[in-house]
Amino acid sequence: MAKQEDVFKTIVAHAKEYGFVFQSSEIYDGLSAVYDYGQNGVELKNNIKRYWWEAMTMLNDNIVGIDSAIFMHPTIWKASGHVDAFNDPLIDNKDSKKRYRADVLIEDEIAKFDEKINKEVTKAAKRFGDSFDEAMFRQTNPRVLEHVRKRDELHTRFAEAMNANDLNELKQIILDYEIVDPISGTRNWTDVRQFNLMFKTEMGSTADGAMEVYLRPETAQGIFVNYLNVQKTGRMRIPFGIAQIGKAFRNEIVARQFIFRMREFEQMEMQFFVKPGTELDWFKKWKEIRLKWHKALGFGDASYRYHDHDKLAHYANAATDIEFLMPFGFKEVEGIHSRTDFDLSQHQQYSGKKIQYFDTELNESYVPYVIETSIGVDRMFLQIMSAAYCEEDLSKDGKQDSRVVLRLPAALAPVKMAIMPLVKKDGLPEKAQEIMNLLKGLWATGCTKKVTEGVLAADFIWGEDLNKIPGLAEAVKVNLDSIQEKGMLETVKGIL
Ligand code: ATP
């Protein structure tokens, strides 16, 4: 098994062991692709949401938030195109009886060419040492050029099939490239079919005639149908944005990789309304702003990249993903889309209500264009756990030893500070409590019972037990000096 897969498995196990993420309905053998957040997970998740919410609504004068309902009028999903087009192409393997997304099978095949190219580059870098010119090597090495040619050929064929919605061609690509089922190892595939990802349920009693409604597959439509309400009541002037955090539901064909792809998940979306014709400039701006926001967390710039879309969704005239280097490769964490005036125009048409903006500078009305930034809370959570997870080698004098540390950014850490009395006497626990009380309400503080109850050597507390507080950001050691030192509490206040 590849080492990275081991790392991923360890992170999943760690997330459970330390109360971050549990399988939903675990005592009933679980519910596929649905997860619960535990005592530490919920704090981390709330901090992620706060970090995003504050960046959007507090650092921008022209972005406000809303919280719309999950259930919405079913016509909204007709207008948005979700009833007709929110599909994934699925394919089954007749031997393993497993279901796959045809597009993902092909994308994985494309990624194999990139892996081959990178292998050639790594091998050559080793061989040539300091004199290695990577750019030159990539441009001239015949093996690299051959892989690039084959990758681009497949890429073009795939993009054309997706844009034309040509399901037969997708199957043909899978056959031509001899893509096998990773489980059965066979090429015994069914035809490719479209599968709608929306969950349906019924609203109202059947005696009254129940209405078929959907669990929203994205939070964005809740923003579009409230555009007029917010614009009018908030007297918002274009350009302005509306942000929302909330649950979304998708009946994903293949739900795997833990909380990366779930059937119930949470999104943080912002729709930014702009003057028609300025949307591509704003798209560029938001691309930059969002990447900067990610990078500010300090996980290293090399872990991020943009991935521009080949197949644009029916509503978009530009789209890119911000990808993060997860233990299973670069994966989408956030999507940034230039959605044109598609959604507002569709709702205008289907609702029969005028959805426009009167521009006082131009003295005319128009349907605004929209730039969307859309990020999954759970995916961001996984990204942060993966980036923060660190195994430290503490081996000394031939004795093997290691420990796990979660290097979380302080702003996201579930426990912000631990206050630890060195011994359980001489007034130290009371002093620790006093400091805790001072900090309560400002920060989430933790004081592990285990530490307060034991008479422990300082090294033990700091070296070992400190790491038992998952995701701890800071710690304060309370010893006799703390008590004797006059004005100590003032000092603590001073560091806040
Ligand atoms: P993917 O290509 O991975 O299916 P998408 O392009 O359909 O994702 P969007 O519709 O752009 O995703 O949704 C915006 C964000 O919502 C994604 O970048 C991702 O972070 C998150 N997201 C989407 N689907 C899921 C899911 N099933 N589970 C968890 N997060 C999701």
Image (tube, rainbow, N blue to C red):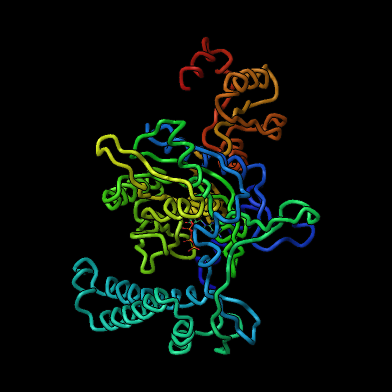
Residue 204 location in percent, x, y? 74, 51
Q: Is residue 410 visible?
A: no
Q: Nearer the viewer, residue 52 or 485?
A: 52
Residue 478 location in percent, x, y? 59, 23
Task: Residue at 61% x, 35% y: name it.
Answer: 461
Residue 392 vertical placement versus 328 (above, below): above
Q: Nearer the viewer, residue 307 or 369?
A: 369
The quadrant in which the N terminus is found is bottom right
Task: Residue at 55% x, 18% y: name it.
Answer: 481
Residue 265 vertical placement versus 57 (above, below): below
Q: Is residue 475 visible?
A: yes
In-image side of 473 versus 160 (left or right): right
Q: Nearer the viewer, residue 284 or 69?
A: 69
Task: Residue at 26% x, 51% y: name it.
Answer: 277
Residue 188 location in percent, x, y? 58, 89
Q: Nearer the viewer, residue 192 or 26?
A: 192
Task: Residue at 42% x, 38% y: name it.
Answer: 56
In-image side of 37 versus 232 (left or right): right
Residue 361 location in percent, x, y? 25, 35
Tell how many labels.
0
The image quadrant of residue 449 is top right
Residue farthest top in this picture = 486
